Amino acid sequence: MTISIRVLVTLLALACVAPTSANAQKADTTALLARARRLHREMPMVDTHNDLPEMVRGRAGNDLDKMNPDLPLDSIDTDVPRLKKGLVGAQFWAAYVPSTFISGGASRYALEQIDVIHRMIARSPTLRYAKTADDIVRIHSQGKIASLIGIEGGHAIENSLGVLRKFYDLGVRYMTLTHSGTTPWADAATDEAKHHGLTKFGEEVVREMNRLGMMVDISHVSDATMIGALRVTVAPVIFSHSSARALANHVRNVPDSVLAMMPKNGGVVMVNIYPGFINQKAAIQSAEVLSKERDFDAKYPNDKARAAKEYLAWLSAFQTETGTLEEVANHIDHIRKVAGIDHIGYGADYGSLTQHPVGLDDVSRYPYLTAELLRRGYSDAEVKKVIGGNLLRVMRQVEKVAARLQKERKPSVATIEALDGATP
């Protein structure tokens, strides 16, 4: 009888402990989320890559009446209501140009994407156009979302520094040197290497971006191009949406050897959440995805627009392992370990994602990632660096370098023909 009473007491104790433990865990999560949201209100949370403009083009022909981001867009992961819920302080919108346009037409494509971004901002009661770090801070203090522009794909300039300067005048504040295809002046990560990194003209592109005050983005480029850009630049670089190759072995991710170069350069790696860049199994599954773009290009050699459209339709149906929010935090931990806390940020790649890590289903979920960093022991000051402080520091340094260089030299009139011997 005594044993039965002891067993009963034990069972009752366990019954009491389990709910208490669950309640304590729930209370801890609630407290961490509240703390994360407070930090997002104190420091502008900056994300450096969202492909919503690409979706507006593909699904609505750039007609914002047919696809209005200020209203819920339930079929994709990004709209203004969810950006507000996610306490996003600043968003770089990507003016993406498919690599099928490397041989021509890329500038027009980029201009049309920049146009839709400007129109999207102008008509929104929440989005505000920004070009500088100070703009971001001011707009955030007003409770609005700062909106900036980045070009994804250096082929957009069509080998012209004059075109590069006009893009800067239109508000472009970073340019990814390549997308999936090698350009006439820079090798891409997912294409044949032709230049051992950057050509002489490619180096001049980096120098002119420094002079303008446009951030040099080395996501998607080959390792040799990463190193070449870091050798030439006199301003910090960014990886606008890349993760750590040591954890997900995809060529678009950043190797430890390059992460270790970040402190000297002062740049920042903005962590991508695409499953193929954060989960090792997904990285293997998606290794050849971008070669499909070239397959469609070959299938429709005289119709670049159709090739791009069919590739994006194929990509939207492609499935891999999804990964988790915790895996994204693991990448942040790794970059912190190798490069340091001053060289990490958020560059999620939302907008066109059809798969998301569990826990990061849309742009409203950023505070949950921030809360996970807090759970892992990051201090408030460290979290503020990751969510926006590091990127703002880079922008200010890029702006400072540009102010100095503009006093020292005139706009470059170099051409690819003169520097590389290329045929017009």
Image (cartoon, rainbow, N blue to C red):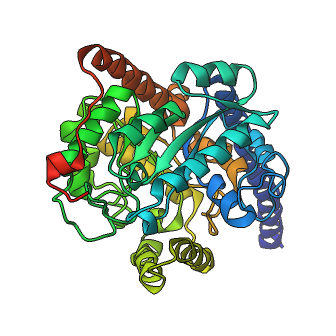
- In the foreground, 328 or 12: 328
Residue 6 lies left or right of residue 246; in this view the side is right
Residue 410 shows in the view = yes
Residue 45 position, x and y percent, is: 60, 34
Work out whether residue 122 or residue 180 is closer to the camera in this orientation and state it: 122
x and y percent of residue 202 in the render? 24, 47
Q: Quadrant of the N terminus?
A: bottom right
Residue 148 to residue 309: above or below? above
Identify the residue at horizontal 31%, vertical 60% (top origin): 183
Residue 57, horizontal then vertical, whole percent: 67, 60
- Please determine whether, in this image, residue 51 is positioned above or below residue 123: below
Q: In this image, 352 relative to 48: left or right? A: right
Residue at 41% from the left image edge and 77% from the top image edge = 294
Q: Nearer the viewer, residue 150 or 1?
A: 150
Left or right position of 139 against 242:
right
Image quadrant containing the C terminus: bottom left
Asked if 285 appears above or below 330 in the picture, the reply is below
